[in-house]
């Protein structure tokens, strides 16, 4: 049986392996849009504007980076030790070959937990078909009776009644009062919806309340409220919060309005501008436009995913992070080099001081030169009567040679 040779094996380069792992991770749709819960540590706000931090739990950690453009839009940036919910996508940083989370949104843990509950319930109800366009019913063009579910003391009710009276005063308005905030609000809203359908049977129902925080609007993210809206015999228009607020009630309703006043406007025709033909064309345009937008959104999402896989943006972003690392390393290397040069200079100063002739003079010696400046190294250079100069540690003086005696003569004596 043939044995494969060692030399037949093909070894990957580190770059090839990293690129393959990057393609597998960044090509996974499940890792392109995720929320991760954890505790922030090692937070660094770089001078470039990028934010680097680590997200950890009891047993694991993952490095995270938020680019300057996303960080500038953040109303909230965490501190070390805070629990947060981080949204983004998972990618690979090629320089180190490590995966990391590229963050585009950071929320405090409490608010993020509510938002995750909202997403989970939305996903489950959407899978059941409660948000399907096929089950949504058209809003009657000429409603004779309009039911309203909201707080009897809120400004939303006054705005809706005022709008209905201005636009279409022929319609009868029936209020089914409900609590719209607090622990008892979901059951109250369900009961109000059921009472309208059972006792009044209006042509359309408006479920509405004014704006507020995610906690204030939480009753309209209740599963019981969503199922009560879906089971309503009359079509339902939701007008909860402001235009930027979205709740489960908005998705399950037959029509979503940006505000309570908008809900009243959508439920009524404008008496000064009504034309039967225009109403028919408007309905057809709405249906055609919605279908076209949904199709274009799907096409755009598909193209966006293809573009992400081929775009140089990932290389540019990785290069930015690499540049930040090189800057930190260069600053550290420069500081180390300066320290070594200072130490070397100190050693040279010590050595130079040890070799200086001035140091020799301190030990009791003298430097003797002739009048012409030549150094006297031997008595052979001198004659009696020569003028010489003697330098000592603290000064110098002139002298005249009067007696010459060699070391040899001293030894004979």
Image (cartoon, rainbow, N blue to C red):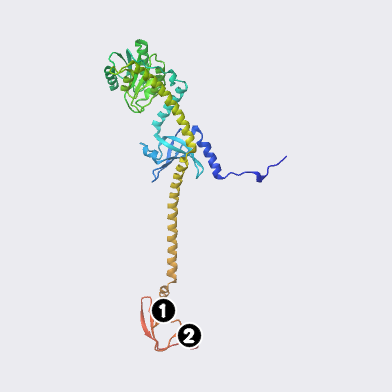
Taking the view exactly as shown, the residue that stands out farthest to the front is 277
Q: CA distance from mark 2 to mark 1?
A: 18 Å
Residue 302's spot in the image, x, y percent? Answer: 48, 31
Closer to us: 58 or 193:
193
Residue 123's spot in the image, x, y percent? Answer: 45, 25
Closer to us: 25 or 380:
25
Q: Which mark is residue 213?
A: none
Work out whether 18 lies above or below 85. Answer: below
Residue 271's spot in the image, x, y percent? Answer: 28, 17
Q: Residue at x 43, y 20 (%)?
A: 133
Q: Residue at x 39, y 82 (%)?
A: 372
Work out whether 90 lies above or below 372. Answer: above
**Label 2: element kind:** helix
Q: Which picture quadrant has residue 352?
A: bottom left
Asked whether the beta carbons under mark 2 and mark 1 sit within 8 Å of each other, the answer is no
Task: Point out the frontmost of discs 2 and 1.
Answer: 1
Locate the N terminus by quadrant: top right
Q: Which mark is residue 407?
A: 2
Residue 184 can be seen in this image: no
Residue 16's spot in the image, x, y percent? Answer: 55, 43
**Label 1: element kind:** strand
Q: Residue at x 50, y 88 (%)?
A: 412
Mark 2 packing: few (<14 Cα in 10 Å), some, or many (20+)? few
Taking the view exactly as shown, the residue that stands out farthest to the top is 199
- Sooner in the amino-acid sequence: mark 2 or mark 1: 1
Q: Which mark is residue 367?
A: 1
């Amino acid at each position: 049986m043939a044995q494969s040779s060692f030399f037949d094996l093909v070894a990957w380069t580190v770059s090839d392996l990293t690129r393959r792992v990057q393609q597998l991770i960044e090509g996974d749709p499940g890792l392109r849009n995720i929320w991760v819960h954890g505790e922030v540590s090692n937070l660094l706000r770089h001078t470039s504007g990028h934010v680097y931090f680590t997200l950890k739990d009891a047993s694991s950690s993952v490095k995270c980076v938020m680019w300057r453009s996303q960080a500038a839009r953040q109303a909230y940036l965490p501190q070390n030790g805070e629990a947060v919910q981080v949204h983004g996508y998972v990618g690979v940083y090629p320089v180190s070959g490590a995966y990391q989370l590229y963050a585009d949104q950071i929320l405090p843990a409490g608010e993020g937990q509510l938002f995750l509950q909202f997403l989970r319930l939305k996903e489950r109800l959407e899978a059941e078909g409660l948000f399907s366009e096929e089950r949504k019913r058209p809003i009657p063009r000429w409603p004779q009776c309009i039911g309203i579910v909201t707080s009897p003391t809120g400004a939303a009710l006054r705005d809706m009644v005022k709008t209905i009276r201005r636009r279409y005063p022929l319609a009868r308005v029936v209020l089914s009062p409900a609590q719209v905030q607090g622990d008892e609000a979901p059951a109250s809203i369900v009961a109000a919806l059921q009472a309208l359908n059972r006792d009044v049977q209006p042509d359309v129902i408006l479920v509405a309340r004014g704006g507020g925080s995610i906690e204030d609007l939480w009753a309209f993210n209740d599963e019981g409220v969503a199922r009560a809206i879906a089971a309503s015999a009359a079509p339902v228009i939701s007008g909860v919060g402001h235009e930027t607020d979205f709740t489960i009630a908005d998705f399950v309703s037959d029509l979503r309005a940006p505000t309570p006043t908008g809900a009243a406007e959508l439920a009524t025709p404008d008496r000064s501008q009504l034309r039967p033909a225009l109403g028919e064309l408007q309905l057809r345009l709405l249906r055609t436009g919605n279908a076209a937008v949904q199709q274009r959104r799907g096409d755009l999402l598909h193209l966006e995913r293809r573009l992400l896989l081929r775009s140089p943006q990932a290389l540019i972003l990785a290069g930015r992070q690499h540049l930040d690392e090189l800057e930190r390393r260069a600053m550290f290397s420069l500081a180390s080099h300066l320290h070594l040069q200072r130490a070397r200079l100190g050693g040279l100063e010590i050595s130079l001081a040890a070799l200086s002739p001035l140091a020799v003079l301190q030990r009791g010696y003298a430097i003797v030169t002739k009048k012409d400046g030549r150094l006297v190294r031997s008595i052979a250079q001198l004659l009696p009567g020569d003028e010489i100069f003697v330098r000592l540690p603290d000064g110098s003086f002139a002298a005249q040679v009067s007696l010459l005696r060699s070391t040899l003569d001293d030894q004979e004596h």
